[in-house]
Amino acid sequence: MKALLRIVGLAAVAGLAAACEPFDLDDGGGGTAGGSFTRGFVYVKSDRNVYAVDDTWDVSVTLPLQLTTQGGAYEPTLSRSGRLVAFVYKAGATVELRTVPTTGQGTPSTVFSITTPGCTGCSNLRLPAFSPDSNTLVFTVYKGNSSTLARVNVDGSGAQFLNTGGYSYVGAASFFANGQSVLATTGTIRDQFNTLIQVPLSGAAPNVLSYSLGNEALYVTNRAVVSPDGTKVAFDGRISSGGSRIFVAPIGQTLGPVTMVTDYVGESVEDRFPSWRGNTEVGFLSNSGGADQIYRISAAAQGSTGTLVVPSAMEPFYGGF
């Protein structure tokens, strides 16, 4: 990381510094994104590097595009533009939020770290999410015995904790369509998130959207993601049998009726890491058949199994619209 630059708040947004906690920041940035890739899945493989495949990819013809080589990558996400990937990098005591362009030729850049001054006690970072304009990242920060949300610009500037209303455990975030707030999961038990809240980026208090995930999902296992048009949410939910499934529900001022989109007969299956492919289809990771692979399914499905898209993959995210 380059020399640290003291950031005292977002000067462009009046009153935000008073509501959010500032950091000392790296003045380095996310690099220059580019290339022909604009839409598809990003994911990691067993070597813990980031890979990308676009919608025209054919497993029998070409290899996936490899974006990193150092390993240590977790939970990548893709910008709406399709030009930039963000991911968590872990190596020993190092935990960083990094970005890399989808050209396959760029060098990863660090935009945030658990050692950033102002993040005292931070121990882990998870599940970054891009804003619709691709300029901002919101991510989960584990700090002591709690977790919360923070934001940072993709050039490494303007990092601040968000106002999550005093909840002790806050999980993954996903931007609403206007880019002014995020959907986040929270709960009273660490990593068992059964409440959905709307968190403004302005520093205003969050709004509870639902204290329940319907009749079948006990809690969100990884993330809840808002559709690009902001009308629906998809999440991976733990069910009473011990597996997890993909659920979809309409969302507005509150959460609408929840539908279990994936289901299986006689299998203990983990369906995880949902992301939207447009507004009518969801991509997700499943170990159905014994191996982690990426599938897609209609958001209107009920108790179906999906279609295989990418074999031998982990922690996928679909982006670029």
Image (spheres, rainbow, N blue to C red):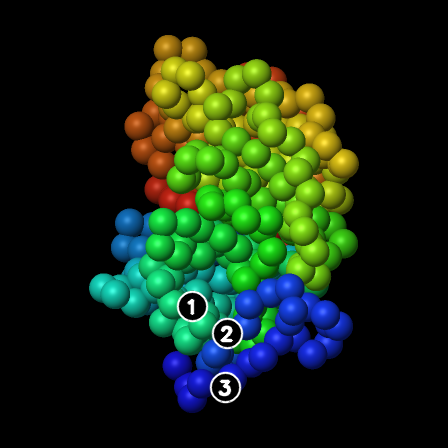
Give, as a three-letter code, the residue at label 2.
Answer: Phe
- Residue at image position (32%, 33%) is 291
Q: Which residue is mark 2?
A: 23
Q: Position of residue 241 (x, y in %)?
A: 39, 15
Image vertical order of residue 312 relative to residue 218, above or below: below
Cβ atoms at labels 3 and 2 below 8 Å apart: no
Residue 138 position in % (x across, y down): 56, 58
- Residue extending farthest to the bottom is 3
Q: Name the mark on residue 5.
A: 3
Callouts 2 and 1 close, C-beta under 8 Å:
yes
Q: CA distance from mark 3 to mark 1?
A: 14 Å
- Work out how far the residue at label 3 is from the one at label 2, CA to CA, in angstroms: 9 Å
Say whether disc 3 or disc 1 marks the residue closer to the N-terminus.
Answer: 3
Residue 154 appears in the picture as rendered: no
- Quick one: 100 or 142, which is closer to the camera? 142
Q: Is residue 265 visible?
A: yes
